[in-house]
Amino acid sequence: MDDAGWPNLAQAVRKRRLEMGLSVPAILERIPGAMARNTWEAMEKGTRKISDTKWAQVEQALDWAAGSIQRVIDGQGPIATVTYHRDPSRPSVTAPFGSELDEALAFNTPPGTQASPAVADAIARALDARVATSPGAQLVAEVARIKLLPISADEKIQLTKAVIDLFEERIREVADAASRGSPSGGE
């Protein structure tokens, strides 16, 4: 692989996965046993090159036409075989969502833009845990879930404010319990 094309490929692979609304585990489900999670993540960061024997599997997972990886390495764009849209009001072929993270990213990232990796990672950690690892992680998960509800923007704002109020109340309870020597808040 041409070293100069690797950063282009890393960026294109990550962009496409996010366009599809898929987490790393979800994209790997499309190529069972073909690649380890840490290999895929390193490929997206541009810190690891994949063997050209894996290119067809990566192209298939990303719904790219054969030869797309070489095109990206050569400075051209990949050829998509399926188009994904995040705007639910527009008809499209959509990927099956593998987790709440996928839905949160797909429905809350405007078409033509990319979700911030930091935001995506924070939501992923909160949602993939399936149970909150901290009150802050729980807040992130709850806000992500609110954004998925089929309610108006004003209702989402009101509900988000209510969740934040509950979060602040819970933080106060935890702090009070900790000062009394009970780390779980008496639960």
Image (tube, rainbow, N blue to C red):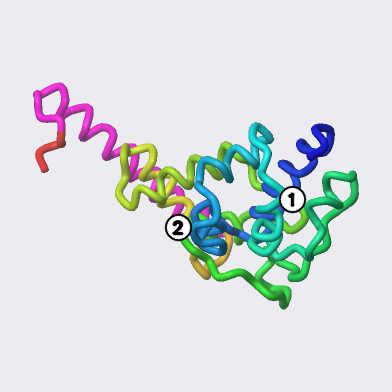
- Decide: is 21 above or below 88: above
Q: Say whether residue 155 is visible.
A: no
Q: Is residue 117 left or right of residue 36?
A: right
The residue at the point 77 percent across, 55 percent down is: 112
The residue at the point 72 percent across, 49 percent down is: 52
First along the sequence among labels 1 and 2: 1
Q: Residues within 10 Å of mark 1 (few under 14, many from 20)?
A: few
Where in the figure is residue 155, as x and y percent of width and height?
51, 61
The residue at the point 46 percent across, 60 percent down is: 99
Q: Which residue is mark 2?
A: 145
Give yes or no for contact between labels 1 and 2 (Cβ–Cβ under 8 Å).
Answer: no
Alpha carbon separation for disc pair 1 and 2: 21 Å
The residue at the point 56 percent across, 42 percent down is: 39
Q: Residues within 10 Å of mark 2 (few under 14, many from 20)?
A: some
- Give the extent of the magenta segment: 154-183
- The quadrant in which residue 40 appears is top right
